[in-house]
Image: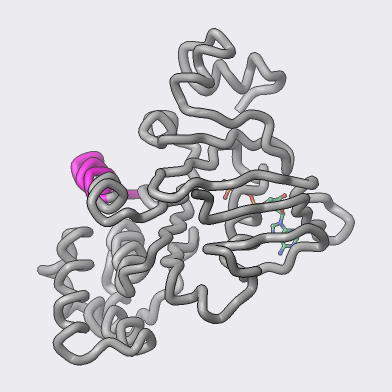
Amino acid sequence: MNVINLQDVSKTFKRKNVIKPTTFAIEEKKIFGLLGPSGCGKTTLIKLIVGMLKADSGDITVLGKQVPNASLLREIGYMAQSDALYTALTGEQNLEFFAKLFGFSKSERKERIQYAANIVQLTEDLKVSVSSYSGGMKRRLSLAIALIQNPKILILDEPTVGIDPLLKRSIWNELERLKDEEDKTIIITTHIMDEAEKCDYLAMMRDGEIIATGKPTELKAHYNAQNFDDVFLKIGGGL
Ligand SMILES: Nc1ncnc2c1ncn2[C@@H]1O[C@H](COP(=O)(O)OP(=O)(O)OP(=O)(O)O)[C@@H](O)[C@H]1O
C-alpha cells in the first residue's frame, strides 16, 4: 500500500521552478531515500509532503488524507535540516515540550523521552541546556523530537550530518528496526552514498526533477554503474 502519493506536484519560488511537475508514490513500511546534489529540491519536496509549503499545482495525499491536514501532524515525525530547538531549555525540557503538545500523560511522556533520548544517546545530557550542545548533539535532539510522538511516518532531512560514524550506524540500525518491527515508513534525504545504499527505494533528483527511481541495486545494475555518482553521470550531469 502507498502511504504517500504525489500527483503532478510543482513549486516555484520567485519564477524559479524548484520542483517540476512530479508524480510518485511511497510504499508503507519502507525506507525511501531522496538522493541528489545540494539545491536540487529535496528539502522543498519534503516540506510539501509535510504540509509546510503549499504546492502551486498538483495533489499530495498522506495516509489517504489531502495535505495539509492537522490530523497528519500526529502521524508525521519531521526532522528539519536546521534544528528548531529551544536553546534556553535543556534537552529534556525540549522533549517534554513536544511530548506535551501531543497530549501524552506524565508517565507516557517519561517513557517516550527515555526511549527517544536513548536512541540518539543523549540520556546523559538531558539536563544540560541546549545552548551548550554541539552541532551533532542538536541534530540528535532534533531526531529524538521527531520520534517523540511515535509517528507512523518519519521524514528526516539529512539526519546524520555531523554525527560520528558509530552513532550513525546505531541510528540506521534503529531506523531499520522501526521499519521492520514497528511498521514505520521512513523518508530520508541524503547526499551520502553509503546511506543511499541502505534505502529500500531511491528517488534520484536533479534540478527539481526525479530522474530515476528504484531499488539501489536495480538502479546500479540498470545503469551499469559502480555507485550512485556513476548513475548520475550516466543519466547525464554529475553530483
Ligand atoms: N523559500 C525559498 N525562496 C526562494 N528560493 C528557495 C526557497 N527555498 C528553497 N529555495 C531554492 O530552491 C532550490 C532547492 O532548494 P532545496 O533546499 O529544496 O534543495 P536541497 O536539495 O534540499 O538542497 P540541500 O541538499 O543543500 O539541502 C534552491 O535553489 C533554493 O535556493
Which residue sits at x=44%, y=55%?
Answer: 156
Instruction: Say above or below: 104 vs 196.
Output: below
Residue 203 coordinates in the image, percent (x, y): 57, 36
Which residue sits at x=67%, y=37%?
Answer: 210
- Figure label count: 0
In the displayed orientation, state which residue is furthest to the left. 124
Residue 223 coordinates in the image, percent (x, y): 58, 12
Residue 97 coordinates in the image, percent (x, y): 33, 86
Which residue sits at x=66%, y=48%?
Answer: 41
- Quarter residue 62 falls in: bottom right
In the displayed orientation, state which residue is furthest to the right. 15
Instruction: Say above or below: 43 vs 209.
Output: below
Q: Does 147 appear in magenta?
A: no
In the displayed orientation, state which residue is furthest to the front. 1
Q: Is residue 161 left or right of residue 174?
A: right
Q: Is residue 27 left or right of residue 87?
A: right
Mainly helix, strand or loop, the magenta region? helix
- Quarter residue 199 falls in: top left
Tell me the quarter of the image containing the C terminus.
top right
Instruction: Say above or below: 197 vs 227.
Output: below
Towards the viewer: 47 or 150: 150
Q: Which residues are magenta?
A: 161-174
